[in-house]
Amino acid sequence: MSEQLLVIIDPAARQADGESVRIAKDVLSAGAAAKLCLPDDPEEFARALGRRGSRRPVVVGDGRALARAVALLHRQGELGGCALSVVPVGDTSLAESLGVPGGAVAAARAVLDGTARRLDLLVDDGDDVVLGALRIPSAPVRPPAAAPVPISAGRPWYRSLVRTLAARPARPATVPAPSAARLRVEVDGQPVVDTDQPVEAVSVTPGTAGMASVEVRPMSVGAEATPLLASGRTVTVTGAEFRYRADAVVSGPVRRRSWRVAEGAWSLVLPAGH
């Protein structure tokens, strides 16, 4: 494997954990001829990746940064011939689910000493790619914390009022309970569930050998309902408008979306023996 590296450090990673970024740079620079690139926005990120030449690209960033790199290479028709590496910084869940070590040192060592592995991914009918699991509907989001109230130095009564309000116990943030969705889920053209059976969640994950794993959780009353499991090469979801979360990005609302498995469509450098 070439020792010429292009290390693209996502701006979000620099803000999230500068120390892990520094460690990754030190390990990679000590073990290979590494050209560092610090883009300020997605456009610069795309230009840096497009000008990599013969250098092997290494993304230092979270799941969004990795998914962005894969999507760019896919759209350029260069994904199949490019082995990607990633040092996860920030949200490491996607990279770890794919087999990349979570720590900066271990991940950087894997970049230098690992082996490129062919992995499946999902491609939807809009030509967007999904590397890990997608979930329908997207998980509810906690309401943002209230903004701090400024205290006016010249108004003692105002300061007293703010102290009184601040002393009251805060109400816990509530997360809306999942609502029933009426969806038709088809795998390879065969229905797994139809709109007459409300569901709580649907998940689709690229598996191995060109097959996707599908899990449908029917809405239950009382005892938890048994999940419906299926596998296949294509998955189509239709019904009421729904949103879905894929690779840390929420998309939608849509009424219909199809995904197909692209077998061995991309390469990710993983620890040797993984």
Image: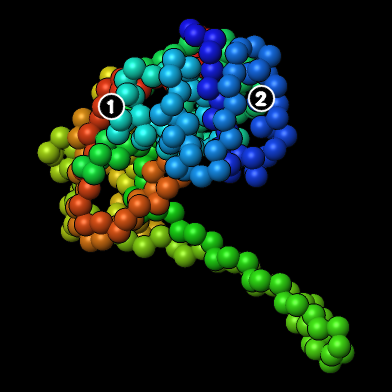
Q: Residue at x 65, y 43 (%)?
A: 16
Q: Is residue 228 visible?
A: yes
Badge 2, how many Cα within 10 Å: few under 14, some, many 20+? many
Label 2 and label 1: CA atoms lie apart by 29 Å
How far across and how far down the image is residue 84, in percent?
Answer: 45, 22
Q: Give the residue type at disc 1.
A: Gly
Residue 197 visible from this viewpoint: no
Q: Amino acid at mark 2?
A: Lys
Is 168 positioned to the left or the right of 114 in the image?
Answer: right
Question: In the displayed structure, would residue 66 be above or below residue 180?
Answer: above
Lateral position of residue 198 relative to residue 90, left or right? left
Nearest the camera: 49 or 150?
Answer: 49
The residue tagged with tag 1: helix, strand or loop? loop
- The picture quadrant where one finds residue 231 is top left
Q: Where in the figure is residue 224, as x and y percent of width and height?
A: 39, 51
Which of the two residues, 105 or 24, is positioned nearer the viewer here?
A: 24
Using the image, determine if residue 179 lies above or below residue 185.
Answer: below
Q: Could you say which disc has been placed on residue 25 in the image?
A: 2
Mark 2 or mark 1: whose residue is earlier in sequence: 2
Displayed quadrant of residue 25: top right
On the image, numbered disc 1 is attached to which residue?
77
